[in-house]
Amino acid sequence: EIVLTQSPATLSLSPGERATLSCRASQSVGSYLAWYQQRPGQAPRLLIYDASNRATGIPARFSGSGSGTDFTLTISSLEPEDFAVYYCQQRGNWPPLTFGGGTRVEIK
Amino acid sequence: QVRLVESGGGVVQPGGSLRISCAASGFTFSDYGMHWLRQAPGKGPEWLALIRHDGDDKYYADSVKGRFTVSRDNSKNTLYLQMNSLKIDDTAVYYCAKTLRIALIVVADWGQGTQVTVSS
């Protein structure tokens, strides 16, 4: 089973700042990595799939990069609604699909 | 507009059974694979199962294999998860989710979830 490690666990930033979230896989997943946003009390929402493809309706301030074992989600300028928990998830070697432990982006 | 509505959650004793459902609308249900996932309090999501669009192929996480069964009724646009031999650790919010595209298993649209609590 592929283990995904997300860092940092918590990111404290101000609105308008740039957020950089990391996800590292225990073995290569190719480009088969997705990112999800989860706000309190809501289901996760797909942001990015296959490392760099934005899902429908996702603002351009969200971008993804990476391949193999190292991936990054970047939020270019944080909006108030972006403060949430973010999860990475792989489908490069499945079953199972696996998720990372999450990064919480909080208001500084 | 894709809509997924889970139902059937509740409180069940350890060792008991429960079947939860997911009613789908806003897309051609029979064209898409469907996932079940869950999320325990304070934890990240955990993938449980995938069923292909025609129901012929099913895949499970080891944590539920042999205890949970995924099925679908394309005539009713409904997905099911039969859960047997439930354990305390199965307590979570259970979500159904649609794949992104035909033959692309990305977990895309999620329902709002249904709470399952296993407790004596």
Image (cartoon, coloured by chain):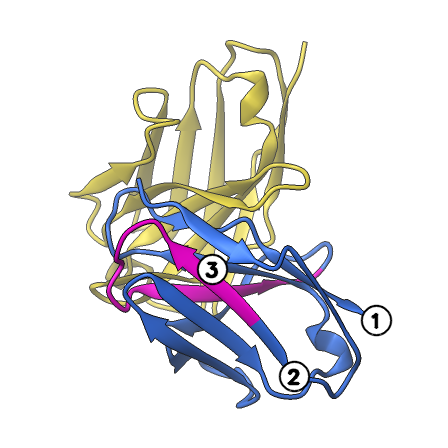
**Label 2 belongs to which residue?**
A18
Q: Secondary structure at mark 3?
A: strand
Task: Name the residue rendered at 56%, 23% in the picture.
Answer: B89
Q: On the picture, is A29 further left or further right than A14?
A: left
Type of residue at label 2?
A: Arg
Q: Count of labels shown?
A: 3
Asked if residue A40 is among those painted magenta in the image, a careful observer would answer no
Q: Which of the two discs, 1 and 3, sits closer to the camera?
A: 1
Q: Which chain is blue?
A: A
**Label 3 belongs to which residue?**
A88
Q: What colour is chain B?
A: yellow
Type of residue at label 1?
A: Lys
Q: On the picture, is A87 further left or further right than B101?
A: right
Q: A80 or B23: which is nearer to us?
A: A80
Q: CA distance from mark 3 to mark 2?
A: 18 Å
- Asked whether disc 3 touches disc 2, contact meaning CB atoms under 8 Å apart, the reply is no
Q: Residues within 10 Å of mark 3 (few under 14, many from 20)?
A: many
